[in-house]
Amino acid sequence: MTTLLEVKDVKVRFALGGGFLSSFGLGATSYIEAVAGVSMTIEQGETYGIVGESGSGKTTIARAIGGLHHAQEGSILFNGTELRGLRESEFRPHRKDISMMFQDPIGSLSPRLTIKSLLTEPYKIQGMKDRDLDAEAKRLLGMVGLPADFASRFAYQLSGGQARRVGVARALALDPKLILADEPTAGLDVSVQGELLNLLAGLQDKLGLSMIIITHNLNVVRHITDRMGIMYLGRFVEEGRTDEIFANPQHPYTLALLAANPEPDPDAQLARIELKGEPPSLIQRPSACEFHPRCPFVRDNCSVGDAPIWDTSVADHAHRCHWPGQHSAA
Amino acid sequence: MENDILNIRDMSIHYSTPRGTLKALRHVNVSVPKGKIIGVVGESGCGKSTLISAIIRLLAPNANLASGAITFDGKDLFGLSEDEMRGLRGTDISMVFQDPMQTHNPVLTIGRQMTDIQYRDDMTMEQKTKRAVDMLTQVGIPDPAARLNQFPHEFSGGMRQRIAIAMALMARPKLLIADEPTTALDATLEVQIIKRLEELQADIGCSILFISHHLGVIAELCEEVVVMYAGEVVEQGSVREVFHSPQHPYTKALLECDPGHIKEKTRNLPTIPGEIPDLVNIPAGCAFAPRCPRVFDACHTQRPEWTRIKEGQHALCHLAGKEAVQ
């Protein structure tokens, strides 16, 4: 397999409302580090899952890869080309290869444009004037299993599942190599979710796409991703092969997430782990292990001293915990 | 029936649209016993929202009640005047909405909003504030007195949803309608919300109508479940009976689709082939017939009856009770 995307130590910062002086470059500008050093490698044809709670930086890292946020540090190598630091005009040619499916399926479709215009807009932006737009719209709708007469509809006339399919079709328009899908199944019921995931898997097999899927649905991650990373406060706390992480979780946050995934069986024995409190603020990150204020298994050295190291000693399964794997309900 | 806080009998709601009459709900039967948590599941477009709007009588202007009735706490809801209905909303029936980011007024403090909704109560401002503080404590908001002065954007999504629950339960309603309250939240926050709902329900003793896509949450939280398909209630029964021996082929198919059930990793998840019927041109007979694996002749011509399977389990299927759907 060839490596399609290599992300190394990427950091994305957002300035916090600087005062009057900061507009002249004076005074201290404070910022939050929404993505605080994320590394991952995606092979061609692979699916990578990013899991974590809202505010953990999942969407920000995806948008940084897609060129919608500027990453201040690190490297984003796509097909051997450094994408970080490119200007908008330099990035635009790469948008053919990296396409995004946004979180809100209906909100990401303009209410004023027909589905045909929405689907064929990428060709206009990329200056592909030779395309037969009617035929392209029909082809794309066919690929995602929607009838051709949808071309003349508007976004508000679609159901949630149909809007997602239009989102997939639009992402496919320029034959991308990588699709970034932000919460592709949120709000869908299970059968429509199954259809959408099967569609993505089928398209991936047919077209050899790589995908990054951002989700908090662990059932989705388990079935369709090859590798996964679990994010907390802008960093991975655990990363590796999906089957390996599910079989042998090392970080207590991973454990809590796995336990928060109830089985659809009223007689199932649930061993849920309730995390204490709220996700901490990115402005004041907790000392030492950043998970310690909420960790149900916290011990003395978790709150003071050194942060836990990013342990990569086991191939395909890295983690960041002082006491990896030693978590019992004590 | 006497034990029901809410009882919906044979209710049909139609919308008049440019394309014709859209039959959003057809002959729906739902009963919500006092003090129980009832789950409602079904695909998008199956009529869950119309059902809720009908219960709180906030139907769209183009909707009309084609048949049936809703009895709430012994009162015929559609027989009430608008004033009487307004008296019920927020006191006896209250609601938690799907999106905690848009439930609150962004320009008023949480404290102002929580005292405002007590406008009916004859209490001093201090008493109202104290009640708001108590309620926030119950849903686990730390330092509630100080946080009353904060605005919605200063709270996280999970906190906002817990505040919404606190507000909905402040009047100690008889029925709480929770419309996918955890859909917009992460798995770990979902656990928190569900635990709070369980505790508060036990404390207040209200009934909850809990709408969700998430079969695992329904299995954990609810005692009974109502399954809806294309504007009809196709099955209602205890969670254990419905999940372990579903009587309607749609229920069975829906349960099989849940990836939580599938232990082996697969790239080909089960789905229910076909599409929901067009609610303007509903096929004669059973609405699920075009997608049903057990379809036979009568399904295309005759509408199935709401059949009692056993105490507390009903299904809308020609095969219901005749033989195991398994």
Image: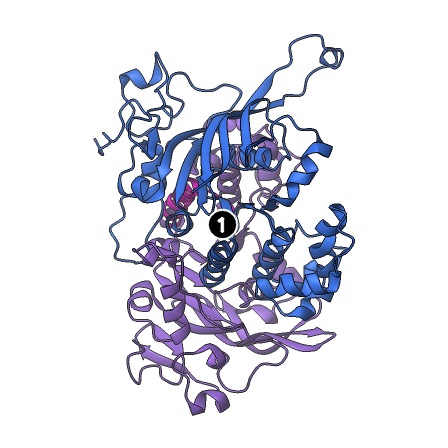
Say which residue appears at 35% left-offset and 20% top-offset.
Answer: A309
Residue B142 horizontal side relative to residue A265, left or right: right
Say which residue appears at 32% left-offset and 54% top-offset.
Answer: A263
| Residue A310 % position (x, y) | 36, 23
Judged from the image, the secondary structure of the residue bearing numbered disc 1 is loop
Residue ID for mark 1:
B183
Residue at mark 1: chain: B
| Residue A241 % position (x, y) | 35, 40
Q: Main secondary structure of the magenta part?
A: helix
Q: Is residue B189 magenta?
A: yes
Residues in magenta, as a range:
B177-201
Question: Residue pushed farthest top?
Answer: A26
Q: Which chain is blue?
A: A
Within 10 Å of the Cα at label 1, are there few (<14), some (14-19), or many (20+) other Cα atoms? some
Residue B211 horizontal side relative to residue A90, left or right: left
| Residue A83 % position (x, y) | 60, 31
| Shade of chain B as shown in the rendered figure | purple
Q: Is residue B223 magenta?
A: no
Residue type at tag 1: Thr
Which quadrant is the C terminus of chain A positioned in?
Answer: top left
Query: Does residue A47 show up?
Result: yes
Residue A127 horizontal side relative to residue A227, left or right: right
Query: Does residue B34 show up?
Result: no
Tell which of A2 and A119 is nearer to you.
A2
